[in-house]
Image: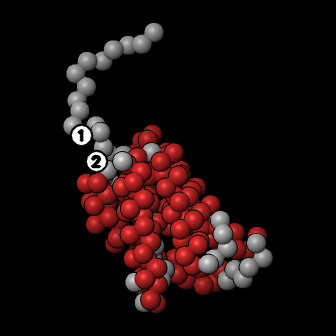
Amino acid sequence: MEGLKAALVLFVAALLQLSILTEYPPFRTGSIVLVVLLQVALLRGSIFGAVAGFCAGLLLDTATLGTLGVTSLLLTVAGFWIGRYGETTARDRAHAPYLSVAVVTVLYAFGQLILQFVLGEPAPAGVVLRSIPLGLLLNLVLTLPVYVLVRRMFAPAELGERVREVRLLG
């Protein structure tokens, strides 16, 4: 059931990004799919985040007729590492959604630039560097409403359950 919810949320985010955000030049630098993916990965873990990132990237690659696998690779890595970050230290921290979006937005831009260069496609570094501040700002503005929505849909199991007894294994 969790996978179906994640697929639905990421599909709607991809539709929003491809149909609305790319039509307006100031919003082209932001990525609602990236923000949604990071919030899902933060709450559900590394494997779930990696699979969701791959599927969302594949959807974006096929919808835009881009180089197949570039966005999938970047979103898979982003989903895995933010899921791992959520598993190990930061799932319940207030700054975790903002920190993960800020770091991954910058790394995603540089990763995309490097992959374009390696594949022999035009990779204008100046354009990417100029678009990072606006993309970072837009993604950070989207973080709070997306996090609230995703947290309601993917409520952590720890909220309702309390550990009453600690049992040592061994």
Above or below 122: residue 142 = above
Rendered image coloring scheme: secondary structure
Above or below 128: residue 34 = above
The quadrant holding residue 166 is top left
Q: Is residue 81 visible?
A: no
Left-right relation of 97 to 58: left
Rate crowding at label 1 as few (under 14), some (14 to 19) or many (20 or more) other CA atoms within 10 Å: few
Above or below 113: residue 130 = below
On the image, the x and y values in percent for residue 141 come to 34, 72
Q: Is residue 162 visible?
A: yes
Q: Residue at x 42, y 51 (%)?
A: 3
Left-right relation of 128 to 158: right
Residue type, label 1: Leu
Left-right relation of 38 to 115: left
Q: CA distance from mark 2 to mark 1?
A: 7 Å
Q: Residue at x 62, y 60 (%)?
A: 73
Residue type, label 2: Ala
Is residue 143 or residue 7 the one in the foreground? Answer: 7
Proximity of marks 2 and 1: CB atoms separated by less than 8 Å: yes
Above or below 61: residue 6 = above
On the image, the x and y values in percent for residue 170 come to 45, 9
Rate crowding at label 2 as few (under 14), some (14 to 19) or many (20 or more) other CA atoms within 10 Å: few
Q: Which residue is mark 1?
A: 159
Q: Which residue is mark 2?
A: 155
Q: Residue at x 65, y 65 (%)?
A: 69
Q: Secondary structure at mark 2?
A: loop
- How many numbered discs? 2
Query: In the rendering, which numbered label is found on residue 14?
Result: none
